[in-house]
Image: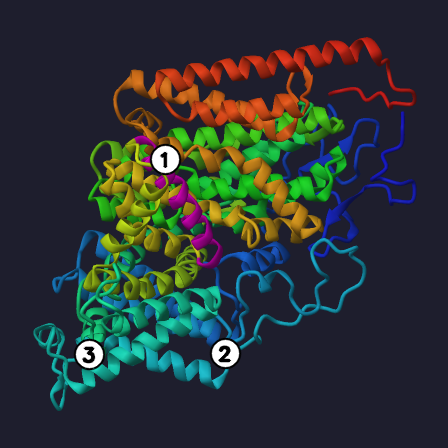
Amino acid sequence: MPRDPDHPAGDPVGTEPAARPDGADTARPAGRGSAVRAEGDATPAGIATDGGGAARPDAGAGGTGPAVADAATSDLAARFEDEKPGRTLTGPAGLLLAGVALAVATLALWQVFRPLPQGSKYYLIIFLAGVLPLVFLAYPADLPARLRRAIRPGRSVPGGSGGSAEPARPLGGARPTLPDWALAALALVACLYPVLPIRLGAGGGGYNAFLDRQGLLVPLDLVMGTVLLLLLLEACRRTTGWILPAVCLLFLGYGYYGGLLPQSWPIAHAGLDFTQLVDAFYNSDSGFYGTPLDVAASYIVLFTIYGAVLDFSGAGRFFVNLSTAAFRRSRTAAGRTAVASGFLLGTVSGSGAATTVSIGAVTWPILRRAGYPPERAGGMLAAAGVGAILSPPTLGAAAFIIAEYLGVSYLQVLGWATVPTVLYYLGILLAVEIDARRSGVRPVLIDTASPWRLLARFGYHFASLVAIVVLLAVGFSATRAVVLATVLAAALSFLDRAHRLTPARLAAALAAGVRGVLAVTAVCAAAGIITATTTKTGLGPQAAALLVSGAQAVASDPTLVLALTAVLAAVALSLLGLAVPVTASFIIGWVIIGPALLDLGVSTPAVAMFVFYFAVLSEVSPPTALAAVAAAAVTGGRLVPTMWQTLRYALPAYLTPIAFVLTPAGLGLLGIGGARRIAIAAVVVALSVAVLAVAAGGWLPGVGPAGVPERVLGALAGVTLLWLEPVPVAVGVALAAVAGTGVLVRRGSAGRAAGPRAGSPEVREV
């Protein structure tokens, strides 16, 4: 049996190479309850077996094998995730942050069943007053922007050769500084000022008095509104970098100076003075306390609390190890495990980069032993991780904003997302199958418990996920459904002694849920600058008219105008997503780009999901590709090749959303229009995804390699099939058939000319 090149003779027996963020391999004890070995390797030591050679769950680990997120993994995830705190606070500061976060969580849960009598805006004021000060304590002032978080002082560059590196310095300091405390106190005052019951000259006087001064702000109101504006910009800078604050300042400048533009320009307006702008931001329903913050305080925080409770109960470990066990005897077990882990973890996290790091920490050793190069493995991990934002029942934050903007139930949004999510993962799985055959991936034997045994013992983790959908279906609101699911998850945690949620651990989970929503709250509140300015100036319709007129300058046919507008919108959304987080990207795209498609007769659900998908795909779009950067940090692969591999895996997802808007038949992909339309749309676009995967991967599974002509024909077929009308579909099917025939002919010619390769290792598939 040939020696495994990744396991040289000098490796200690019973150890498994582990991925380090800097790309260097170090020996570590084989994981508890789960191990990976190439066929012919000695069974790793340290694995408890059931007597038949198969690994059995370690009772101490809850039967779920390696931890999904140990301390190192959690730290790495925090470096790449826009919605995770940058500091791990201890001592009095840590106790204060945990206590305030617990109080905010309690308020959010209480609001679901006993809303504050003063109304929802009053609740938003209190919620922001509890969250914004924590941002200045949890995030250091020197937190770099999204990409600069990839290369920290003391870490080798992802994709480098590894080797020694200086110990990583604490992220921005271990404790809040005096300016951090001052900003936190100032944030508390500025947030609570609207409800301050004390008269301060002409200002103050309580909540009702503050509302009565709408449009008539006194100087103290103006000062406090300006302070809160600056604090929100700084909070966004700390959590997401400079780009989003710069975009907000651009909109602010447009609102103030737009009146100086020539009135013949389409985007010119009458102009707003600074008092009017602050009034719109601070004392209206479209500013800081508008729909984005309402969604963060009413929905997102509850789902992050739910995710934290599931994580504390051991669900994350179970989902990853169930994926490992399900494919332990497949030739493509390594790739399938990574993809399935991304999907299952995505149902809990709803976060792309953090899911990428979590699944990479467990599955990268498997992928490496199977023979995947770091860049290709990183691309697979990033594409699978970003799918977390698309995976029901806990989609990304923007999905809740869709429900609020469109005035529909969250269950409807889940229905719209179901078929596209399946198609997204279909494309990744096909790419995995193609890579396994094209690259000669080695079979691996994954020693783990039977999937049926894992399901029998820990399958209760699925109960709360199912409960959310069932409760939504029977008429519960999304907020009540997720709270009841959280209670169920907490109760079921007592079935596992290692992960039972005692009062102390439950309090920690609630606090962790609030800590996970700090950054998205700052982003949503700051997005009020964009939405309020757009509303006051009428920028949305003006920008939409510009986009449509640009398409009309190229073509006059209404169908071509729609297609060109969709392509221009996709490009604009992709470029926007390179600079700002997904939530902000969706909000800006909806108010600026969405109206262009609506004006051309595209249905509102199709436009909303179109904008949502391209906002999400920004996490895998070069040159930023946050999820790809995170994956490269895990695998040690070169950064740019990892980004391009990610793009290849996710390629079908870039084209599928265009089918939403091109024709009414595209609504079938969103589950709209009856069973026949849904089935036809799903089948045709599945074929499109398949031929696009073949074109990108250069291999037709079951047949052989595809040459350049076949790949070009396949790409044309895939794009044509997205136009869900009879003639384009027939043309697309014909092109796909010709491409497939070409691959068959190529295989026949190659088979007659080639024989078995000398020296090829024979590997028995298990």
Vertically, is 521 above or below 31? below
Confirm whether the magenta stretch covers residue 571.
yes
Q: Position of residue 216 (x, y in %)?
A: 10, 78
Which labelled disc corresponds to residue 275? 3
For label 1, the crowd category at 10 Å Cα-Cα, with few meaning under 14, some 14 to 19 and many 20 or more, is: many
Depth check, mark 2 against mark 1: the one in front is 1
Nearer to the camera, 247 or 726:
726
Vertically, is 218 above or below 539? below
- Residue wearing tag 2: 176
> Which segment did they paint magenta?
559-580
- Residue 424 as seen in the image, left or right of residue 521: right
- Residue wearing tag 1: 563
Disc 3 to disc 2, how far (Cα)? Answer: 34 Å
Question: Secondary structure of the magenta portion, mostly?
Answer: helix
Q: Position of residue 127 (x, y in %)?
A: 28, 65
- Residue 476 as seen in the image, left or right of residue 145: left
